Image (cartoon, coloured by chain):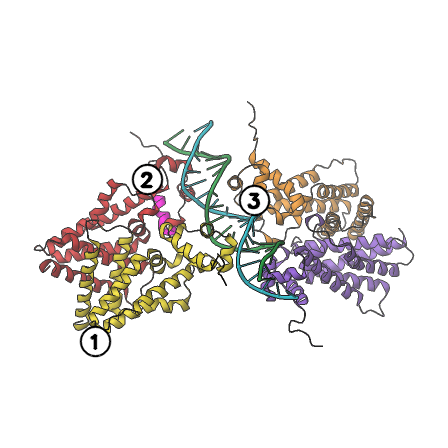
Chain colours: A yellow, B red, C purple, D orange, E cyan, F green
DNA sequence: TATGAATGAGCATTCATTCAT
DNA sequence: GATGAATGAATGCTCATTCAT
């Protein structure tokens, strides 16, 4: 009971789209390009995805699935709460740097430029941030502004990620040290924030 | 030495392009549209600008001119160095929020997706960051990592700006308070960084 | 002798097609749309109808069935022959105005632009005109040009109908009065035609 | 000072469009088809005509120009008023039969299926009908319902024309006699109408 | 019977760019 | 300097139709 050579065209469409996203970006991505890459007709794309936005939405969903899955499966039984928070940040950062195409459509698309991401799917998108919140609560249990703080951490991470991906960070700066240092500061901020603020 | 009735078509092209950029965004900006707006032929655009990328580069340059100009003209004679640093951040943030389309082409375009921004123009682009560095040196004269710190501040600001512009920040969060709070933390970080690190 | 749950898919296809024809028009009617409406696959449509033209022919046939049925079932036992003729005209006119999309495919499609309407089906199409002929014979029994006259009446009715449907008739003209008046003239013509001509 | 081989592309586009309209009809007319026929690129069509509707509108205008011109230039100094009216009808009929493509877009397009014909152009479209009105006033000066009557005549002519063009008229009917006979009746109607009504 | 996956050609429209004048 | 005519390739998307299962 062998698989046909075209194991799963839907899958192939998603994969090729992702691949193309990396070097073309969302704006220069076209259905025809994808169909050429996949080796099928344009019509076939439309058979699996109602339109271009729906196809991109499917990829966004995948991205959140993968990222949140990684975040939830951090193995750190003996780690201190603050070590866990730091690992969460690392996982977020690493996911972004390893999957710039996912990251771009997940966090950089301006809503006015494409159909609104369906509301029901937003829950998963929010899950990532909730994990930050939870970890902050654990690391600094006396504070109650974990919601606020999680956004601070997130925006900081996002800034580093996007400027690195846009190649705007001076090459003299050691990327790894920079991130570690930034995370140190984030950690510190969070503790003070929760203890004091 | 009279001016021709069309004082400066090149100027007019840039002005109209800027205007169009602001309400259409870079991706919906077309040469034809610009020529229609300016009231000249497409050919004329190509007379002054080799191609679309060159025109966009000119816009990027203008963006930096405007922003750096604002940063350099902060009037704060009696302000403390740290107040000045804070104002610098504010000016950067405000420029970004008031000119999202400029900000996007200045900081979010991925270099592999368009003709390389000419090396000589990068100097002006770097000038903005140098102003941060200088302000940090003043505010914390004993440290020597102002280069590093300026990048930290910058990435933080950039993260907030881009997530706000992509409408990813929860609406429950008061934008103004969030930014002020973030700036407080940035300031604090910088001083400790410079004093201690 | 139980019916299958899908009593008659062919019937359902025709019904949905008719429904769609009415609010979309023949040109915006697509096989896919029909299959979606019916709840079957496109293949199923092709199982019952060789191609789109055949399906449209079936619709034309239905149109003639409905119209001729109405014409034949005029209840007017005590009416004079000329009153009956007038009613026949009214029924024709009303059918056309109530079912513009039907009327269009029945009478306005140019034969060179689609597969020839099958010869055997033309009989029913002609039936409508024969009813006019019969009525004219009754109303003016002495003439023998009822064939000719029926065409005159028909073309007149058709002209009014199509110009009304194309919204070319001045709005100041009261549609109902206009038609009544036209019918008066048609009647008058027919009598004279038959008596004199 | 010889003409270039492409005397006037705009003209050629209009001519080819007209030619294609004859056997394809408005619904199966495509810009690509036209460009192929003309031997130019699609872009060239769009250089001369903003879009498909504008191109068709230009043809409609041409049609009215030609038809009204013919109607206005009837030479009939010694003719009686009723002879003049009859000639007007003849010219209308002949124009329609000789130029079915013009006639179709001039009088059969349903407004919901394309952009509204620009209001300012309607004046010329109405001119044709006004000529009928004037002729009726001359032929039957005592009546005052020439407006109404002109519509009657027009609808009658239109019905004959469209059914002939759709090849719905029985071949046994002699087209020329049929029209003459119909015109007789129309004439008669008009006189009575005006005298009596 | 009925399906669903797939195709290839088509649609109107827009684009950056060229080039003779 | 500046124009305007022209192109070829691209865009997202829809279509009638086929066919192995």
Asked whether the residues under the numbered discs 3 and 1 touch, taking CB atoms below 8 Å apart as contact, a structural biologist would say no
Query: Is residue A106 inside the magenta stretch?
Result: no
Q: Quadrant of the C terminus of chain A?
A: bottom left
Q: Position of residue D25 (x, y in %)?
A: 65, 47
Q: Which residues are magenta?
A: B15-25
Residue A149 is at least partly visible in this image: yes
Side of A19 where C146 appears, left or right: right
Q: Position of residue D155 (x, y in %)?
A: 72, 51
Mark 2 or mark 3, whichever is nearer to me: 3
SS for tag 3? Answer: helix
How far separated are the C-alphas under marks 2 and 3? 38 Å
Asked whether the residues under the numbered discs 2 and 3 touch, taking CB atoms below 8 Å apart as contact, a structural biologist would say no
Side of B191 where D104 appears, left or right: right
Same-chain status of marks 3 and 1: no
What residue is shown with label 1?
A141
Q: Which residue is outermost to the front?
A: A1
How far separated are the C-alphas under marks 3 and 1? 68 Å
Same-chain status of marks 1 and 2: no
| Closer-to-camera residue (B85/A15) | A15
Q: Which mark is residue D31?
A: 3
| Closer-to-camera residue (A118/D47) | A118
Mark 1 or mark 2, whichever is nearer to me: 1
Image: A78 above or below D118: below
What residue is shown with label 2?
B11
SS for tag 1? Answer: loop
Q: Which residue is outermost to the top?
A: D1
Image: D35 above or below B67: above
Side of C126 where B76 appears, left or right: left
Q: Residue at x 37, y 42 (%)?
A: B52
Name which quarter of the figure residue F20 lies in: bottom right
Q: Which chain's residue wears label 3?
A: D
């Amino acid at each position: 009971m062998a698989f046909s050579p075209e194991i799963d065209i839907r899958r192939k469409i998603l994969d090729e789209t992702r691949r193309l996203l990396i070097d073309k970006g969302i704006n220069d991505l076209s259905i025809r390009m994808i169909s050429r890459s996949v080796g099928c007709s344009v019509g076939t794309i439309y058979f699996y995805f109602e339109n271009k936005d729906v196809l991109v939405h499917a990829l966004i969903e995948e991205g959140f699935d993968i990222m949140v899955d990684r975040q939830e499966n951090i193995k750190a039984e003996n780690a201190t709460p603050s070590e866990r928070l730091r690992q969460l940040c690392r996982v977020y950062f690493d996911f972004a740097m390893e999957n710039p195409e996912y990251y771009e459509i997940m966090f950089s698309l301006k809503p006015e430029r494409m159909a609104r991401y369906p509301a029901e799917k937003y829950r998963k998108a929010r899950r990532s941030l909730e994990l930050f919140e939870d970890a902050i609560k654990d690391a600094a249990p006396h504070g109650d502004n974990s919601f606020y703080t999680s956004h601070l951490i997130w925006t900081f991470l996002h800034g580093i990620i996007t400027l690195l991906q846009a190649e705007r960070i001076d090459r003299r700066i050691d990327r790894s040290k920079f991130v570690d240092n930034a995370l140190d500061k984030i950690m510190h901020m969070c503790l003070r924030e929760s203890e004091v603020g």
